[in-house]
Every structure is written in structure tokens, then in C-alpha cells.
Amino acid sequence: MVSPRIAIFPGSFDPLTNGHVDLIRRSTHLFDRVVVAVLVNPEKRSLFSVDERLTQIREVCQLLPESAQIEVDAFEGLLMHYALKREACAVVRGLRSGVDFEYERPMATMNAHLAPTVETVCLLADARYAHVSSRLIKEVASLGGSIDGLVPTSICERLLARVRAETATRS
Ligand code: PNS
């Protein structure tokens, strides 16, 4: 029997954006199974907890036509240890710009050193989302700007509630 081709789509996803969703969908067209893997990083302050992010991402992915191919999980430590444990053949990353490329290149090279059997596959971000990052989404939302169409609707509502709560706590 031929083993399924598994790809890991790792990230912080704080929050998941429509750019991420587009990359997840496109990855399912290239691989049998795509594992969306949320990094557990206690040192990084996040807007949503890992459990909240897992729930949000699962809810969004369940509604995709490709849902049967998608799994949502969390991982700690080295990405390549996780990728090998999951018997993945690839890690998928999105590129929005040359800045992303320069950020990804040393990570991909280090990851190839750690696990030569796991290929890093970079997909170009769709032009609709080339300006979208989780950091900018949080900044725009917290300053009252529109993030319509850039974040899944279910997450958008929770994001606005959370940034409002944070702003109220600070003032
Ligand atoms: O969405 P992000 O925050 O840009 O994702 C970065 C991520 C999670 C892919 C990267 O930080 C990572 O792989 N962290 C796990 C620790 C690790 O493997 N570090 C060595 C990378 S060469």
C-alpha cells in the first residue's frame, strides 16, 4: 500500500487569517493530508490561547470542501521532530514577499539539515492576501479598522471582542 503524503502547515495562527485558509486549501490539492500545526510557545504572548486557536481553526476547516483531508493539532519544540513523528514528507509555508522569503530561507535550510527527508514547500500567497498578517490584523482591529474579508467570519467576531476586552482592561 502506498503511504499517504502528509504535509505540515505550521504557524502561530494568532489568529488564523483568510490567507492561511487559502494556503491550507491549496495544500490539500498537493498532498493527501494536511496537518495544521499550532506552535505551543509559552514565551510568546498571544491574543488567543492555544486551545482557543485549535477550536477556531477546527471550526473553520470543518466547513471547507477539503475538510476530510485536514487535521488540526498543536506541537511543542522543534518543528522537524514533530514532522518526523507525523511521518510528513513536507512542510508548507506561504510567501507574501521577498521579506518572507528571507525569513523562510534560513529556517528551511536549518530544517533540511535537521530532517533531510522533509521538504519545505513554499506557496506564493494569493494577491488578495499579500498584505495580510496576523500581526497587522490585530493592530488594525484594535485601532477600529475594518478587517472584513481578511479573517474567517467566526474568528473575526471573537477577535473584535477580545481586542475590545484588552483595550478596556488597559484603560
Ligand atoms: O506563523 P509563524 O509564527 O511565522 O511560524 C513560525 C514557525 C512556527 C513555523 C517556527 O517558529 C517554528 O517552526 N518553530 C518551532 C521551533 C523550531 O523548529 N525552530 C527551528 C526552526 S529552523
Image (cartoon, grey):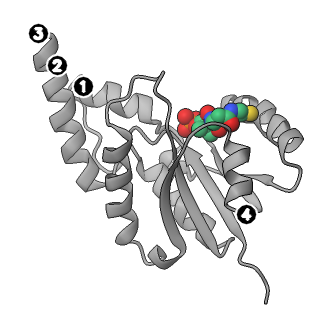
Q: Choose top left, top right, bottom left or bottom right for residue 143.
A: top left
- Element assignment for label 4: loop
Percent across and percent down for residue 117 are 86, 56
Local packing at callout 1 (Cα closer than 10 Å; few below 14, some 14-19, many 20+) is: some
Q: What residue type is disc 2 on?
A: Thr
Image vertical order of residue 30 relative to residue 55, above or below: below
Image vertical order of residue 113 relative to residue 6, above or below: above
- Which residue is label 4 attached to? 87
Tell me if residue 28 can be seen: yes
Quadrant (top left, top right, bottom left, bottom right) of the N terminus: bottom right
Q: Choose top left, top right, bottom left or bottom right for residue 8.
A: bottom right
* Tag 3 and tag 1, C-beta contact below 8 Å: no
* Tag 2 and tag 1, C-beta contact below 8 Å: yes
Which residue is farthest top?
Answer: 171
* Tag 2 and tag 4, C-beta contact below 8 Å: no
Q: What residue type is disc 4 on?
A: Glu
Tell me if residue 101 can be seen: no
Residue under the point 41% across and 47% down: 17
Percent across and percent down for residue 131 are 49, 37
- Comparing 43 with 145, the one in front is 43
- Which residue is label 1 attached to? 142
- Comparing 53 with 28, the one in front is 53
Tell me: is circle 3 under 8 Å from ligand 1.
no
- Which residue is label 3 attached to? 171
Q: Of marks 2 and 1, which one's residue comes earlier in the chain?
A: 1
- Which residue is label 2 attached to? 167
Q: CA distance from mark 4 to mark 3?
A: 48 Å
Q: Which marked residue is nearer to the observer: mark 4 or mark 1? A: 4
- Element assignment for label 2: helix
**Apparent side of residue 99 relative to residue 39 in the rendered image (left or right):** right
* Tag 2 and tag 3, C-beta contact below 8 Å: yes
